[in-house]
Amino acid sequence: MKEIDMTYYRKQIDALDEQIIDLLAQRTRLVQQLMVLKKGQDDTSIRSCDRVRLVLEKVRKLAESKGMPPEIAVSTYSTLIQELTEMQIRALDPKHQLENAQ
């Protein structure tokens, strides 16, 4: 493959990466807003296994419909959900908040 061809595709990928990060930032802000509603509730409101299962099923179907290997989408979303769940637990856990205040 010619270097010029590779440069073109790499620029396209870089532009997509920026869009993906913008969307992930929007999703993260929504989760942060949702945390306000979850304040004072137990971990089950944060760790909703049924919701995670539904999201991952939806992601798998979306990936398949777009011609993307579903394993990539499910793996990516599994990590995203895990990290956002941990973010919520840290933010809503009174022990963690006290440790950060010191």
Image (spheres, rainbow, N blue to C red):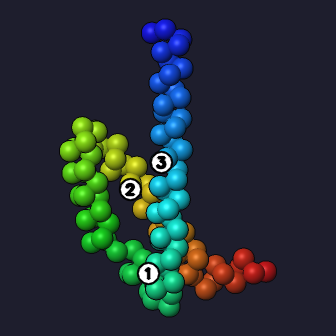
Q: Residue at left 27%, top 64%?
A: 53
Q: Residues within 10 Å of mark 1 (few under 14, many from 20)?
A: some
Kind of residue at disc 3: Ile
**Which disc, if any, is residue 20?**
3
Quadrant into which the N terminus falls: top left
The residue indicated by pointer 2 is 78
Q: Residues within 10 Å of mark 3 (few under 14, many from 20)?
A: few
- The image shows residue 45 at horizontal and vertical percentages of 39, 81
Label 2: how many Cα within 10 Å (few below 14, some 14–19, many 20+): some
**Label 3 vs 2, first from the N-terminus:** 3
Q: Residue furthest right?
A: 102
Tell me which amino acid carries mark 2. Ser
Q: Residue at x 64, y 78 (%)?
A: 96
Q: Quick one: label 2 or label 1, which is nearer the N terminus?
A: 1
Mark 3 or 1, nearer chain start: 3
Q: Amino acid at mark 1?
A: Asp
